[in-house]
Image (spheres, grey):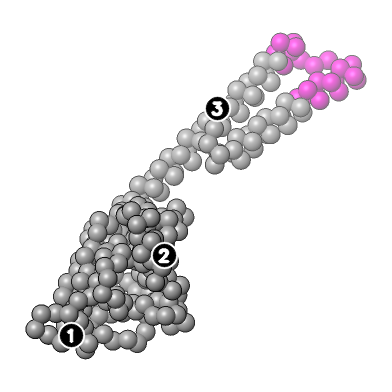
Amino acid sequence: MNRKYVKEAIGCMMISVVIVLLLLGMVAVFEYLEIHVPGSREMWIGLIGAVLGGAFTLIGVLITLYHQKESNEENRRLEYMPILGFEAIMSETDPELILTITEEGVITSGFFCLKQKICSQIEIKTINHNCVFDFQIEGCAVNGKKIASGSAFYPAKRRLTDKEATSIVFDYDINTNVFCLLRISYKDVFGASYYQDLPFTYAETIYDGEDRVRQIVELRDVKAPTLQKDAKDLEEAVKDYLDYKVFCEASSYIS
């Protein structure tokens, strides 16, 4: 039996046991006081059997009702679950969020890199027209290692409708190709919490004919949303996207 129905089953059985004990107690008291009880022993045995049979029937009905309720709630959740879409674009417009890797960790404030770099923005929007609530960057891993949040890591929460999009610039001064994983958390209209991991490779190079550095961002396959209660650790999640050992060997320079 499913563990979630144990309380209901135990409750029905306890009520049945109490009723049976009361019936037996009544019979015992009547016999002790030599009071004639209408009906035969077979009738009382049949009555007790009917009580037990009714209890098992009630358990089955309750389990069916709870299962149907859970099934309806799950179908509703899936219907309104937002799915995020991602696209790497070159843009001179200001992004809404800049994530910068510094010596103290990842931060969300300050270092506006568009003046010094040709930035590749990551545009994020909902692709199934379901509204996103409390959207925020939850964490970051580079080459299989989780980057600690710096003292200036304060990603604001925001809402996304099917007509809106937000953009992120990832900034890390490095000329070697690295693998990054951003964890994005959000909620649906009913308050269910999800996350999606955004995998991408990042590198910087001198742009031909320019003095500025150019960011190279290549998005990898993005998996479906996952409920927060089933969340993996970021370093564990990296294993779903790449050869973990290879990238761990290259991550020694990440502080």
Identity of the residue furthest to the left in this view: 209
The quarter holding residue 134 reads: bottom left
What residue is shown with label 1? 212
Cα–Cα span, label 1 and label 2: 29 Å
**Residue 88, magenta (yes or no):** no
Name the amino acid, label 1.
Answer: Arg
Q: Quadrant of residue 234?
A: bottom left
Q: Write the residue at 47% across / 82% down.
A: 151
Q: Where does residue 44 sit, x and y in percent of width and height? A: 72, 16
Q: Position of residue 240 (x, y in %)?
A: 35, 52
Circles 3 and 1: CB distance less than 8 Å?
no
Q: Main secondary structure of the magenta part?
A: helix
Q: CA distance from mark 3 to mark 1?
A: 75 Å
Q: Residue at x 64, y 36 (%)?
A: 10
Residue 183 appears anywhere in the view? no
How crowded pointer 1 is (Cα within 10 Å; few <14, some 14-19, many 20+) is rated as some
Task: For marks 3 and 2, give the one nearer the viewer.
Answer: 2
Q: Which residues are magenta?
A: 23-44
Q: Amino acid at mark 3?
A: Thr
Left or right, residue 239 beside residue 21? left
Residue at the spot 63% in from the left edge and 21% down from the top edge: 50
The crowding category of the residue bearing disc 2, from other C-alpha atoms within 10 Å (few below 14, some 14 to 19, many at least 20), is many
